[in-house]
Amino acid sequence: MRELEAWLAQTAEVELEEMSSFFEKRLEGYEDHMAVWEKAYQRFALLLPDRCREVLDLGCGTGLELGEIWKRNPAVSVTGVDLCQAMLGCLAEQYKDKPFCPVCGDYFRYDMGQGRWDAVISFESLHHFFPEKKLTLYEKIYRGLKEDGVFLLGDYIACCDREEELLRRVYLQRRAARPGAGQTTANEENGGESGYVHFDIPLTLEHELELLERAGFSRAEAVDCVEGATMILARRQG
Ligand SMILES: C[S@@+](CC[C@H](N)C(=O)[O-])C[C@H]1O[C@@H](n2cnc3c(N)ncnc32)[C@H](O)[C@@H]1O
């Protein structure tokens, strides 16, 4: 917590950046920066049940988790949703030979359909959003999965309530201090259309699992944690 508090103090004057331009600006060097999670990506891929053929990736970025999944099974067909066209372009360029359908857009608005996916996956993307917003997404994921489908989440988890509350408080202060902040309505506070900003507001494991259960998942459990990336497997049916 001390390190986090010190970092927040150091970065107090740094203005929040809009989500997709944040990633676009950092595209060069992005994969090197994420290399600390190499083992986490490998573990994540191993946790995807072998039977999965139709997979939806929320916030797929340049496809680091998909690279590992395709190493194990190149036939897995993936739809990847991401706000950032530049990240998706990089993915498409690297994996031209793989069954991949890119969707440039907001996963909160993406129509996942009903009973369509063997697995919905997401790695290091959902910690940017408030629990109320995540709950509606988790309900949508639940409906979009086949009966025996799974939601596999790899993400940054807050170590305690204090960290969760601190980051949320700082996020709200910084968001309110942004130029033009007064123009957003209350229900856009977590980002309306293209209003998302890049700032981490992770939930504790307890709160994350609670949300998944509220969304209908009969079993949701943390199955591993690698380099700070917690892997949660939620099954539509127990
Ligand atoms: C830290 S990157 C992770 C990318 C990839 N999963 C990986 O592990 O390398 C987060 C990604 O989530 C995307 N993202 C964030 N919010 C999003 C949203 N609401 N809809 C779609 N993509 C989103 C960002 O554009 C970015 O590419």
Image (cartoon, rainbow, N blue to C red):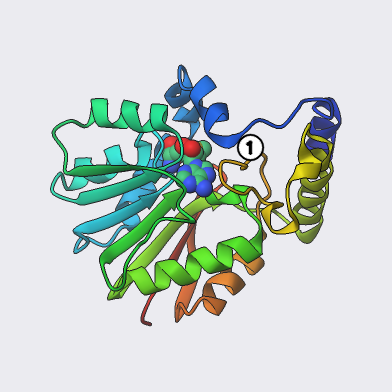
For numbered disc 1, what is the local secondary structure?
loop
233 and 195: which one is in front?
A: 195
Residue type at mark 1 is His
- Relative height, residue 234 to residue 15 (above, below): below
Could you say which quadrant of the image residue 133 lies in?
bottom right
- Within 8 Å of ligand 1, the CB of disc 1? yes
**Residue 17 in view of the camera:** yes
Q: Identify the residue at horizontal 35%, vertical 62% (top origin).
A: 112
Counting from the top left corner in percent of width and height, residue 20 is at 52, 33
Which image quarter is the N terminus in? top right
Image coords of residue 131 (percent x, y):
64, 63
- 114 displayed left or right of 35: left
Residue 175 visible in the current orientation = no
In the rendered image of this protein, does residue 40 appear above or below residue 162?
above
Q: Is residue 164 left or right of residue 156?
A: right
Task: Return the residue at label 1.
Answer: 198
Q: Which residue corresponds to the image point at 61% horizontal and 49% vertical from the top-left?
A: 192
Where residue 236 sits, quadrant-wise, is bottom left
Q: Nearer the viewer, residue 227 or 202?
A: 202
User: Which percent across, then down, holds residue 227?
Assistant: 53, 42
Q: Residue 235, position in %: x, y?
A: 39, 73
